[in-house]
Amino acid sequence: MFVAPFLVSLLIGAAILGGIYAARRRGKLSRQAAVAFALFIVVLVIAVTWFAPIPYIV
């Protein structure tokens, strides 16, 4: 039960990071924007992983 939200957020994060990488390779995204997006995704995955078990516990 605890693994499902983590896996979903990880898959979504990986897809978005893949899109960021592809846009960066084509030159459509600046380095600073790519780093900002990547940090946002990492924080989002950590937040979902950290707070998702709460409804299962309560």
Image (tube, rainbow, N blue to C red):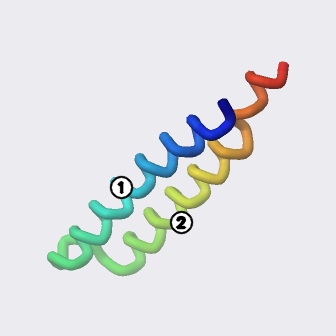
Q: Position of residue 36 (x, y in %)?
A: 47, 68
Residue 14 quadrant: bottom left
Amino acid under label 2? Leu
Q: Residue at x 15, y 76 (%)?
A: 26
- Amino acid type of disc 1? Ile
Please determine whether, in this image, residue 4 is positioned above or below residue 14. Answer: above
Label 1, label 2: how far apart the Cα atoms are = 12 Å
Residue bearing mark 2: 39
- In the image, residue 9 sits, relative to residue 20, either above or below, namely above
On residue 30, which mark appears?
none
Secondary structure beneath dot 2 equals: helix
Residue tagged 1 = 16
| Count of residue discs | 2
Could you tell me if the residues under marks 1 and 2 are in contact, i.e. CB atoms within 8 Å?
Answer: no
Please state which of residues 35 and 21 is positioned toward the viewer in this rendering.
21
- Report the quarter where the C terminus lies: top right
Circle 1 — which element?
A: helix
User: Looking at the picture, does residue 25 appear above or below residue 56?
Assistant: below
